[in-house]
Amino acid sequence: MSFTDVPEIITRVNRSELFVPGSKPEFFKKAVDSKADVICIDLEDAVAPPDKDQAKKNIIEALNEMDFGKKTISIRINGLDTNFCYRDVIDVMENTGDRLDLIMIPKVGVPADVYAIDMLVTQIENKFAKKKKIGFELIVETAMGIVNLDSICTGSKRIESLHFGYADYAASVRMRTTNVGGPNEDYAILTHETPEGRLVHWNDLWHSPISKMATIGRAHGLRIIDGPFGDFSDPDGYNAQGKRTAILGCEGKWAIHPNQVELANNLFTPKTTTIERAKKIITAMQEAEDSHQGAATLDGKLIDAASVRQAQQLITQQELIDSMN
Ligand code: GLV
Ligand code: MG
């Protein structure tokens, strides 16, 4: 390990993050009754401009009156390039108590984007003597967001997590797709000649930015969360995308429809067999250490101190999930 420590930012269970448009208060209760770990009430892209004011009123009313139980509650504000952004923060924070947990900032491009929102939030928290300190979720969804990500993560101590925004990212870098997540038949390679002819192997067109986000975010101790999968009638596609991002280090995924919540919870809860193996690794390495061995063999495979670290982070994730139930 480096002598520089990676700080552990507040850890929350964030396997599923269910989005509800602020303009549809009739869906709020359904979201509360769902198994989502986090509910994000949207003021941004799921709300048409003429409905933004009413959406904000709905959110204020819900935060003051609704019983959200133990759920983590977030709001997605409008981007800093709009005229809605500052009032989203001020109106919601000044007119509600301490129920809001997180603010999601879309389309971050430079550290000052986050710093500016922190300035507003800090003043309001101090003026109103709020007991809870709001955390930030950032959506990484522009070319600038990727290029400046390392410094963006230093923009505020409130940042808890990074989220990948497929649609805006695709638009920003001019990808030739209108899908929100998922594969594309044009992003494929042709194999050499095989007995079945030349095979087409589809690749993951989202791999590079998500992998970057995971590495940079983790260097700052942040949670890494996979974004939306637009085709909510394709659970297999959702699962395939989520499996890939879980392997890359994401610990949760957005649900843009309630039927994606259970899928996300299952995908981002480590498998029983994975945890069993992790525990076996810890035990085997303890035994190895007791007999002055730095490495051991488990089920025919080499394990050493790095395997213990791999195993331990999985067990820690599972313990966090268990602590919520
Ligand atoms: C989410 O905000 C996206 O752009 O996909
Ligand atoms: Mg977006």
Image (cartoon, helix red, strand yellow):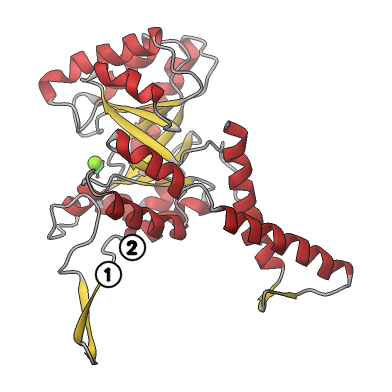
Q: Quadrant of residue 288?
A: bottom right
Viewed as shown, does residue 167 lie left or right of 213? left
Q: Secondary structure at mark 1?
A: loop
In the rendered image, which residue does mark 1 sit on? 203
Ligand 2's quadrant is top left
**Disc on res. 252:** none
Q: Quadrant of the C terminus?
A: top right
Q: Nearer the viewer, residue 208 or 314?
A: 314
* Quadrant of the drawing holding the N terminus: bottom right
Q: Name the element at disc 2.
A: helix
Residue 233 image offset from top left, x and y in percent = 22, 45
Which quarter of the picture shows residue 284?
bottom right
Q: Pinpoint residue 318: horizontal percent, then vertical percent.
A: 60, 45
Q: Say few, some or many: other residues with alpha carbon within 10 Å of mark 1 (under 14 / 14 to 19 / 20 or more).
A: some
For the point 10% across and 20% down, the residue is 50
Where is residue 170? Give x, y as percent.
20, 54
Contact, mark 2 vs mark 1 (Cβ under 8 Å): yes
Residue 7 appears in the picture as rendered:
no
Residue where numbered disc 2 is placed: 207
Mark 2: few, some, or many residues within 10 Å (few <14, many ≥20)? few
Tell me the amino acid under the disc marked 2. His
Query: With respect to residue 15, does 244 lie above or below?
Result: below
Amino acid type of the residue tagged 1 in the rendering:
Asn
Relative side of 193 to 140, left or right: left
State the residue lying farthest toward the right.
Answer: 291
Q: Give the spatial CA distance, label 2 vs label 1.
A: 9 Å
Residue 77, placed above or below residue 163: above
